[in-house]
Amino acid sequence: MIQVAKIGKSVGVNGGARLHILTDFPEIFAQDITYTAKSIGLNPQSLLLKIKSFENGIVVFEGYESRESVKTLTNFTLYASLEDTRKYCELKEGEMFWFDVVGCEVIEEGEKLGEVIDVDRMGGVDYLLIQAIESEKFPKRFLLPYIHRYVLECKEKKIYTQGAKDIWLSS
């Protein structure tokens, strides 16, 4: 499941809710997709968008067409399936989904440096959190900016880099 939005406060009297988009692919909301809504301590729920008004950031969920009912969804996080994400979100040349990057080996000059365990965005730049190969001298993890300066190519679950080893050794 991929986190795509957070449900905000209710708006109006007809079950509108503010939707805070957490994805780079807002087109995921343009289709008739069933989302999973989760909140800590509560059972997950399946939700279907009934009305979408993204100019105002407002949505209405099927079965939650009143102010009182939609308030029960405030602060829930919406998730889309991997299958729907792949189906409805179009990637540009050279782009990859974060969930496809996680698990990739990081290779520099034929040497495996480690494996990507997470991706995080800081200041508009995506960073790969890399679990480094075992070494007593160097850190167990390091961050690598996912930019052309360091990432040369990504194919077949391998990310080929330059300068990544220097970042690891100086961490």
Image: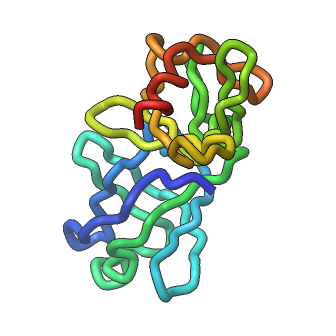
Residue at left offset 57%, top offset 85%? 43
Q: In this rendered view, identify the residue nearer to me: 2 or 30.
A: 2
Q: Residue 152: horizontal and vertical position, in percent? A: 58, 11
> Observer-nearest residue: 91 or 11?
91
Instruction: Answer above or below: position of 142 versus 66.
Output: above
- Place of residue 162 in the rendered image (x, y in percent of width and height, measured from the top left): 55, 13
Residue sitting at the far bottom? 41
The image shows residue 140 at horizontal and vertical percentages of 56, 48
Q: Identify the image's colour scheme: rainbow, by chain, secondary structure or one colour.
A: rainbow
Going by the image, does 8 lie left or right of 92? left
* Residue at the spot 60% in from the left edge and 47% down from the top edge: 136
Q: Residue at x 36, y 57 (%)?
A: 59
Q: Residue at x 44, y 19 (%)?
A: 147
139 left or right, relative to 6: right
In this rendered view, identify the residue nearer to me: 171 or 131: 171
In the picture, which quadrant includes the N terminus?
A: bottom right
* Residue 116 % position (x, y): 62, 40
Count of labels in the image = 0
Q: In the orientation shown, which residue stands out farthest toward the front?
A: 137
Vertical side of 107 occupied by 30: above or below: below
Query: Does residue 110 appear to the left or right of 19 in the view shown?
Result: right
44 is higher (above) or lower (below) than 24: below
Any part of residue 108 in sight: yes
- The reply to whether residue 84 is visible in this rendering is no
Which quadrant of the view contains residue 11?
bottom left
